[in-house]
């Protein structure tokens, strides 16, 4: 059940990202291949966050451009912020992580 929920969440996140950022290819910011890779990275990071009980995946936004992951949103503690960054850094094909998460208890 936990695995199915994480997969469903990842699928919804992936679809949202594909529809929301589809214009980055049209604006020539990246190639189609790079765009697909970035969408896969974003989906993988969100899925890992959904599985980790110490991170609120719904409060943290993940965006990827050319292998650089941008984290934003709100965390309840510095530990949650650090864990979200660690998850992103340990995801395959991530080149860099920019952590703009704000800690707000």
Image: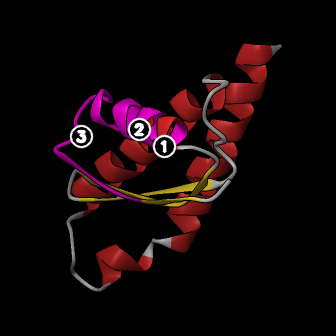
Q: Name the residue under label 2.
A: 82
- In the visual, does 67 lie left or right of 37? left
Q: Mark 3 points at which residue?
A: 94
The picture places residue 68, in percent across and down from the top left corner, at 24, 54
Q: What stretch is highlighted in magenta?
A: 80-100
**92 within the magenta span:** yes
**48 within the magenta span:** no
- Do the numbered discs 2 and 3 sit on residues whose CB atoms are within 8 Å? no
- In the visual, does 24 lie left or right of 104? left
- Do the numbered discs 2 and 1 sit on residues whose CB atoms are within 8 Å? yes
- Do the numbered discs 1 and 3 sit on residues whose CB atoms are within 8 Å? no
Instruction: For marks 2 and 3, give the CA distance.
Output: 16 Å
Instruction: For marks 2 and 1, give the CA distance.
Output: 6 Å
Q: Residues within 10 Å of mark 3 (few under 14, many from 20)?
A: many
Mark sitting on residue 78: 1
Q: Is mark 2 on a helix, strand or loop?
A: helix
The picture places residue 2, in percent across and down from the top left corner, at 77, 16
Q: What element carries label 3?
A: loop
The picture places residue 104, in percent across and down from the top left corner, at 62, 59
Residue at 64% from the left image edge and 32% from the top image edge: 50
Q: Residues within 10 Å of mark 1 (few under 14, many from 20)?
A: some
Residue extending farthest to the right is 1
The residue nearer to you, when weighing 12 against 88, is 88
Residue extending farthest to the bottom is 27
């Amino acid at each position: 059940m936990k695995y199915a929920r994480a997969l469903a969440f990842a699928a919804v996140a992936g679809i949202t990202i594909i529809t929301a950022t589809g214009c980055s290819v049209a604006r020539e910011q990246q190639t189609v291949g790079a765009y697909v890779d970035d969408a896969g990275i974003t989906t993988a990071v969100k899925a890992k966050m959904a599985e980790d009980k110490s991170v609120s995946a719904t409060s943290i936004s993940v965006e990827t451009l050319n292998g650089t992951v941008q984290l934003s949103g709100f965390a309840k503690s510095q530990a949650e912020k650090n864990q979200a960054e660690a998850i992103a850094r340990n995801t395959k094909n991530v080149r860099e992580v920019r952590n703009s998460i704000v800690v707000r208890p």
